[in-house]
Image (tube, rainbow, N blue to C red):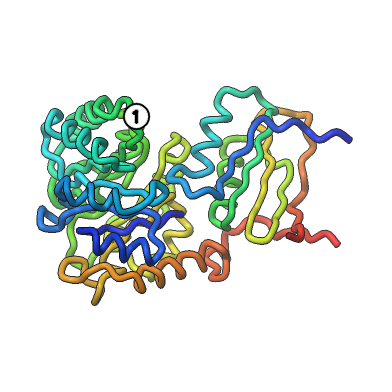
Amino acid sequence: MNSPTVAFTVDGTLRSCKGAIARLEQKFADLPSGSLARVRVDNVPNRIDVRAWADRKGHRIVDEVRRGEEYELLIAKGGDPGIPSGSGIVIASR
Amino acid sequence: MMLMVSVQNLEEAREAVAGGADIVDVKNLREMMVGSNFPPVIREVRNAFPKQIHVSVTLGVAPNQAGTVALAVYGAAALGATSVKVGFVQSDYATALRILRESRRALEGSDTKLIAATFADSHLYEGIDPALVVKLGKESRSDGILIDTLIKDGRNLFDFIQEPTLKDLVLEAKEAGMSTALSGALKVTDLHALVRINPDIVGVRGAVCTNGDRESGNVVASAVAALRDELQRRLTGKVDVFAEVEPSAPRVLS
């Protein structure tokens, strides 16, 4: 099975004043529904915030993987019916 | 989440960075509680650290004069500040917006970020409703927002604005593409709530000063490191602040 095309990746693990949600919002704005974004965060509150943001905006968490203290989420921009949703997160070894 | 420590001079800045601060916020407590420091001090601090250590400049009590503030903002950029915070004491929304828009214009061509600041205790001195900070930030095209307190009488941010309201403001600002910072006599005991709110930046001073005294005390590296460690323990889940709100439990594949 082919991997879906990811439009962009946000690295929320970098030390930056502007967090993952701010950058996701900006980059998602001009993309069509169904576009995929990958976001990496390295702490629990950012993971919770990204999930809550996606819920509120009508986006879907398609997949989520945990590697140690990092979480990688694959998000589909709202409105797309064609991408299967993951049922939870996968914990991977480092 | 980045840790911002307010400092008054290079010695304190060195202590803050040695303790793990991501941002040193240069201010001058002798000009009100959040006053501005002098250009040579700001330059000295900026030159002492690599660019990945952010140096912010406080214009905490800006006068209601757009030209004067814009010129000060321009000065902060010329000194290489990573960001400049413009706050308002006795002002109104329209005046503050005009000042921030002129500040934005003053920063054209500069990498320095503009931060719109309001005070949680603004009702005590006829300031701007802090709930308007996101609107103010968006309409002025600021890069970020800060909610602080002006009064330093033992009360802190959470005595004036409750956690759910702060959470909503932070999320709204993030969704508008801005950075978010909370400050205001914050202590270790506030870290649970702060991590749940999850601003991009947490600002402290008294909590990392000798004797916990933001005015007569000095920033010390060991106190910064201890606070940094406590923050990190909560961010990584070693201390659980989300017991009741964390989303679905992880699925473990064999």
Q: Chain of mark 1?
A: B
**Quarter occupied by the N terminus of chain A:** top right
Depth check, front residue: B111 or A37: B111
Mark 1 Cα shell of 10 Å, populated few (<14), some (14-19), many (≥20): many
The foreground one among A56 and B22 is B22
Measured as percent of width and height from the top left, residue B159 is found at 28, 61
Residue sitting at x 67%, y 30%: A7
Left or right: residue B18 versus residue B38 is right
Secondary structure, mark 1, is: loop
Q: Is residue A11 left or right of residue B181?
A: right
Q: Give the quadrant of residue B240.
A: bottom right
Image vertical order of residue B101 relative to residue A52, above or below: above
Q: Position of residue B204 (x, y in %)?
A: 31, 61
Judged left or right of residue B126, residue B120 is right
In the orientation shown, which residue stands out farthest toward the right?
Answer: A1
Name the residue that disc number 1 marks: B141
Residue B190 location (% of width, % of height): 38, 66
Quarter of the image holding residue A92? bottom right
Q: Which residue appears at 79% of the width and 37% of the height? A: A84
What type is the residue that disc 1 sits on? Answer: Arg
Q: Residue furthest bottom?
A: B211
Query: How many marks are shown on the rendered structure?
Result: 1
> Which quarter shows the C terminus of chain A?
bottom right
Residue at 34% across, 70% down: B221
As rendered, which of A26 and B165 lies closer to the eye? A26
Q: Position of residue A10 (x, y in %)?
A: 59, 40
Looking at the picture, does residue B197 appear above or below residue A12? below
Report the front residue among A68 and B78. B78
